Amino acid sequence: MAISNIVKSWLFQVFQIPSILFGIFTLYHLLMDRTLRNALNNHVIIAMVFVGLILQFIDVSALAYYWRTGTALVSTRAFCLTWASVHAVGFVGTVNLVAWASIERHILIFHQNWVGTKAKRFFLHYLPLVICMMFPGVFYITMYFIVPCSVTMNYKLTDCGYYSCITVNPAVALYDTIANYLISPFLIVIFSVALIIRVLASRCRARQRIQWRNYRKMAIQLLSISFLYMFLYCPPIFQYTAYVAGLKQIVATSYYSDSNYFGYYVIHLTPLICALSMPELQTKFKICFPCCRRCRVAIGPQALMMTRPTAAIAAIAK
């Protein structure tokens, strides 16, 4: 049974506000703390949270309004183009960043010498972050703003129907499906599973136990985010791949529709997972929100009052 649009809208709004607050909290502390800001493993987290906040303010708000009313948030061509562009570039770019993080963790944990110089850091750290956002950005902006599109704008459709500018051309649609929607989820699964295997193998070696303690935080941080995408974002993508491979589209239609909807929750939950998977942010969170601290009773030496029965005291006095 498919979830109704009004329920989708209210669920989105329930998760949206906490997600924005966690996103601002995480981004603020990652940028203001010099140690956290300079750590290479946090740069992809900063990029994901920043793009996620843009999606929250524009895409998620527009989708929640669309599911509640059946029309676009603002019925203008400029807004529709902005909505379609932010939705496509932001969502695909975020998944690309997670895929790259799954690859980069292998470098940061097991091959630190690969980023030991400025030149190596540029080509193996900073440049991939730019490419993750640049490729979908160039593709979708070209298709929406440069290539002529005969699709009529419809305020009653998601993204005002602008995504049809891509699907109208079979070759372009095939490229979009493979490059923007299939490759990254498979990379997330493959390299996350590979990281688990390498971590378990390294822990079995006595000489690498000390080194593993230093990089455990990075592995846990990445795997927490990867599992979120593997359980929420990847299932509809894999099901779509099965449809393309020949599976009849009448199979699990309701599940496909609902799983596509829940795939959006990776945007809601990513800031929360980032904050909870980093011990430094956990400490800052408890400082900012004292109500989340555990109440601990201080136990110390106490003076004990020793008393004796009245009869015993009287006997001693005699």
Image (cartoon, rainbow, N blue to C red):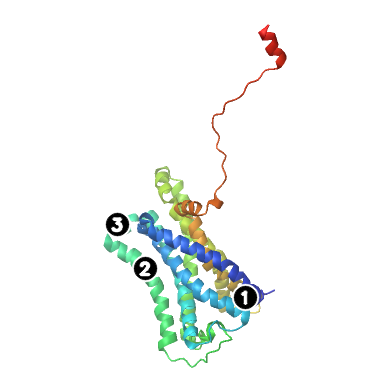
Name which residue type carries label 3: Gly
Q: CA distance from mark 3 to mark 2?
A: 16 Å
Q: Is residue 136 left or right of residue 158?
A: left
Q: Is residue 184 left or right of residue 239?
A: left
- Across and down, in percent, residue 196 comes to 48, 55
- Across and down, in percent, residue 100 comes to 42, 66
Specify few, some or many for label 3: CA neighbours under 10 Å numbering under 14, 14-19, or 20 or more.
Answer: few
Q: Is residue 89 left or right of residue 298?
A: left
Specify few, some or many for label 2: CA neighbours under 10 Å numbering under 14, 14-19, or 20 or more.
Answer: some
Quarter of the figure with residue 46? bottom left
- Across and down, in percent, residue 225 comes to 50, 61
Quadrant (top left/top right/bottom left/bottom right) for the N terminus: bottom right
| Residue plotted at (40% across, 71% down) | 132
237 or 32, which lies in front?
A: 32
Q: CA distance from mark 2 to mark 1?
A: 32 Å
Residue under label 1: 257
Q: Earlier in the sequence, mark 3 or mark 2?
A: 3
Residue under label 3: 116
Q: Which element carries disc 1, helix, strand or loop? A: helix
Residue under label 2: 128
Specify few, some or many for label 1: CA neighbours under 10 Å numbering under 14, 14-19, or 20 or more.
Answer: some
Q: Which element carries disc 2, helix, strand or loop? A: helix
115 or 11, which lies in front?
A: 11
Name which residue type carries label 2: Pro
- Across and down, in percent, residue 10 comes to 62, 72
Quarter of the figure with residue 242? bottom right
Q: Which element carries disc 3, helix, strand or loop? A: loop
Quadrant (top left/top right/bottom left/bottom right) for the C terminus: top right
Judged from this view, the residue extending furthest toward the right is 311
